[in-house]
Amino acid sequence: MTTPDDRRYTESHEWIKLDGELLTLGLTQVAVDELTDITYVEMKTAGETVGPGDSIGEVESVKAASDVYSPLGGKIFEVNAQLADDPSLLNTDPYGEGWLIKIKVADSSGFDDLLDASAYQSLQG
């Protein structure tokens, strides 16, 4: 699967898409492939405030558990409720239906400092 170029990436394998002040965050295909069969997702709840670099939740697979981090701070706007019933959406569609969380960002200035698709792919190299 190609790395979509309409979003930014972190070295810890999160993708971030910014639409105005609303940030959507998920896991990259690389993270999903490393974790293999994801069986459980737990995110913080809507209304909670997070800072840049804060853990916003955890995903578990048959192989490992991994924290998920937000590169920008703000207030959690929405959590993908579908993942509670069907965490396999992360395995099948990490860049679409498998998004994890939406955050209303307090300051989006750090967004441009994140990796673009090309830079992220070169890290996998």
Image: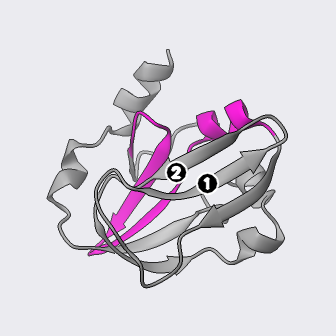
Residue 42 location (% of width, % of height): 65, 64
Q: Nearer the viewer, residue 4 or 8?
A: 8
Q: Nearer the viewer, residue 39 or 6?
A: 39
Kindly indicate whether the residue at mark 2 contacts the one at mark 1 (C-beta within 8 angstroms). Answer: yes
On whether residue 46 falls in the magenta region, the answer is: no
Left or right, residue 68 beside residue 70: right
Residue located at (52% from left, 51% from top) = 68
Residue farthest toward the top in the current orientation of the protein: 125
Could you tell me the amino acid type at mark 1? Glu
Judge the density around disc 1: few (<14), some (14-19), many (≥20) Cα neighbours within 10 Å.
Answer: some
> Disc 1 marks which residue?
58
Q: CA distance from mark 1 to mark 2?
A: 6 Å
On whether residue 18 falls in the magenta region, the answer is: yes
Quadrant of residue 9 within the rendered picture: top left
Judge whether 91 appears above or below 29 on screen. Answer: below
Dot 2: what SS? strand
Residue 104 location (% of width, % of height): 33, 77
> Disc 2 marks which residue?
68
Left or right, residue 26 beside residue 94: left
Could you tell me the amino acid type at mark 2? Val
Left or right, residue 103 beside residue 105: right
- Please give the range of residues in magenta: 9-36
Residue 57 location (% of width, % of height): 55, 59
